[in-house]
Amino acid sequence: MASVKIELNSLTSAAAMSNGRPVLLPRHLSDEEFGMFAGVGESRDVQPDEIIFRRGELGRSMFIVESGEIQLEFGDGLPDKLIGGREFFGELVLFIGSHTRVANAVATTPTSLRIVDQETFEKLIASHPRTLAQFMRRSFSYLVGSEQQLIQSLKRRNEDLLVTLDSLRQTRTQLSTAQRLVQTDELTGLCNRRGLYMFLERLEEYRLPGTVMALALVDLDRFKQINDHCGHLVGDQVLRAIAEEVQNAASSTDLPCRLGGDEFALLMQVTGEEELCARATQIVSAVHSLRFPGRKEGLAVSVSVGASLCTDGADWAVWYSDADTALYEAKGKGGDGYHIAVPSLTSAGALHSVM
């Protein structure tokens, strides 16, 4: 017991004094408490970086630090705690039975510990009821205070997390909006060239079995005259209306787009030439029935459509060239109609047209 007395005398002076009496910090043991545990606890010496217990382990004992320092590592963004001489930790297992450790306990310096297990604690209840009751009362107060601090910390972290999530949502929305704007024609809302090229890069992801690719180029007839005679506002209205009709002719797996000026494109997956003709007919007929302000009887407009089934394995330039050749033929015959070029027959000069 001599060594215990020396430890008591050397550590008591570390406590704060109030009216000549020591004021204990939350985890500091009084002389009476320290003497009680030191008289019954098992002694253990540990070295720096030695692990006392790990988070998640089932606890069975409380520990009193006689000398040295222990670091409690809680993880999950919570701050660590240092436990010094005449302080205790792991006490919850003695109050509620087996308890899962919530932190790693690691020695940071050469440390001497006293270990108090459940059986020893039960004996102290019988032999030192008053001292133990005092210890438990302070311990409960500390645990409640720590729990409240943890709740507040978690509340702040939750609020920070909500702010971060909201910021991420806004950023994602802004990025999505920016990406959509980059790929979208501002006037018509259709995909632009950039969006078309991005779609082509991922085309295989959208392919449907039993279909072939087809491309239709849609060009407004005599668009310059509309702008010159009726003004650019009417011209814009016409472009938006044609864009809507191109969109109406598209299925969910097709890509309608505005290539620029008065030229539109519809990249399709069709079952064959018959369906391609039907799509072209739909666009030509729908535009033909439109009327716009600018004349007493209403301004009528028309489009020319050049379309082609796309050769598998060929790139966009080849697809565009085949459809553009058909469009040139449609334009050459006065417009307001379509021409369908079949790639496998184009070399022989076969061209289907409807005017």
Image (tube, rainbow, N blue to C red):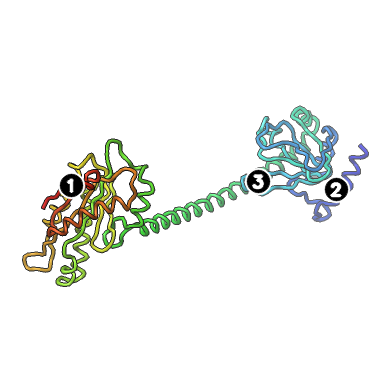
Horizontal relation, residue 341 to residue 149: left or right: left
The residue at the far front in this view is 348
Amino acid identity at mark 2: Leu
- Disc 3 versus disc 1: nearer the observer: 1
**Residue 187 coordinates in the image, percent (x, y):** 27, 62
Q: Dot 1 surroundings within 10 Å: few (below 14), some, or many (20 or more)?
A: few
Q: Which quadrant holds the N terminus?
A: top right
The mark found on residue 146 in the picture is 3
Residue pictured at 34% horizontal, 44% vertical: 313
* Label whose residue precedes the other's in the sequence (3 or 1): 3
Q: Secondary structure at mark 2?
A: helix
Circle 2 is placed at which residue position? Answer: 11
Residue pictured at 18% horizontal, 65% vertical: 223
**Residue 108 coordinates in the image, percent (x, y):** 78, 45
CA gap between label 3 and label 1 equals 86 Å
Q: Nearer the viewer, residue 195 or 76?
A: 195
Q: Secondary structure at mark 3?
A: helix
Amino acid identity at mark 1: Ala
**Residue 336 coordinates in the image, percent (x, y):** 13, 57
Q: Dot 2 surroundings within 10 Å: few (below 14), some, or many (20 or more)?
A: some
Circle 1 is placed at which residue position? Answer: 350
Residue pictured at 19% horizontal, 66% vertical: 235
Amino acid identity at mark 3: Ser
The residue at the far left in this view is 297
